Image (spheres, rainbow, N blue to C red):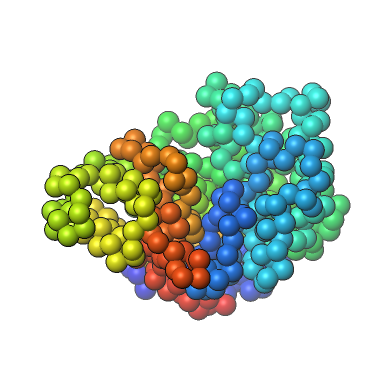
Amino acid sequence: MRATKYIAACSAVLACMTAPHEACAQAALGANYNESLTTIDERELSRVDATWLRGFLDMRLMGDVDPVRDPNVRAILAAKAHGHHVILSLKWNYHKLDFAKPGSPEMDGEIARLRRLLPVVLGKVDILVIGNEPFIEAKPDQQDERLNVFYETLANAVIDAWKAQGGAASGTQLYMGAFNRLDLRRNQTRAVDRMLHFIASHPELSGADLHPHLPSFDANREMLAYVLPRLRPDQHFLATEFSLVWYWRQHLEDVVPEAFTAKYGFARGAKVYQVIDAAIQKPMPYAEWKAFLSGEPWYMAQQNFLDEEMALFRGTGRLAVATYGIRQGWNADRRFTAESEPWLLNSVFASRTVEPNSDGTAQETYPWGDAFRRLQKAGSAGK
């Protein structure tokens, strides 16, 4: 079964070599920075052999500022200048607002921001994604055709600008999304289907972006089985965010083994979230962080997660690029509790919970650093 998946993945990569753009179906694994593009560190990327990276811009936070002056825009263009392939997602956060309607002053403002940005990034970034997490970044009572009309209006504006700049010849591919938790029937709504239909019906769009933050490996299969048949056969998918964050969340109140608490000075009966909080407040030596993680059976049960997830994605023959969380995003002034969302357990680099290296770079998180590096080589085998 594994051999079949590997052959399928390599076949997809080889087929892509005849496509007009290098990004198509490479089945690459890259580094996801989310909104923290200014934290890009070439030394860290080099250490894990990362050639692709991704981040997003919050369009409503950009205001009327010239995009050339925006620090996140400058960071992603600098990464491109350093030789990386880059994915840029455009985020519209409407979770407290009604969607702007076509022809309204609010929509005119959104289109104006787009028109300032697009000449700066089209032809520079390899992939531009229209949207970040549309159905999460919307009020619950607006997750219907109003959401569709809003994103379709913006997508059409992007497509028009892309065509004017040479379309596929510009060097930028267009995707749309991203979709969350489509393993759940309650999220397989008419509005989701309409957006997938919009993507499939527009030849300018290369495919859909997915964010499989899921509690199990089987849920990944269910989400792919729902999305891929709704795309055109020539379209691909991105997974610009993916994780087992909801699986990790289930174990935050587990009691930490006494072998660890006794050795490292924690109270007997300390819970997982308490050790993580202590590491945020005072970063640990790497050996202590590794001992903590490797002593948790629920964590080690998923030590092959990255390998298995990428085998699944690549085995579809439809993966363009997947990007995985690269650095822990957490402020030391926030306490980590049993209710916190443990994104930081996913990250390749333990930039918040572990003491930095002597040169100021972050140390890796066990075992994701080794897996990420290994998967770079697997992804390039068929090129």
Q: Position of residue 339 (x, y in %)?
A: 34, 35
Quadrant location of residue 94? top right
Give the residue drawn at x 40%, y 61%.
355
Farthest residue to the right: give it: 164
Give the residue drawn at x 58%, y 65%.
41
Closer to the camera in the image, 271 or 161: 271
Q: Position of residue 64 (x, y in %)?
A: 79, 38
Q: Is residue 324 left or right of residue 117?
A: left
Quarter the N terminus occupies:
bottom left
Q: Position of residue 286 (x, y in %)?
A: 34, 65
Q: Is residue 262 left or right of residue 213?
A: left
Closer to the camera in the image, 80 or 75: 75
Q: Position of residue 36 (x, y in %)?
A: 58, 51
Give the residue drawn at x 77%, y 29%.
107
Closer to the camera in the image, 3 or 161: 161
Q: Is residue 139 visible?
A: yes
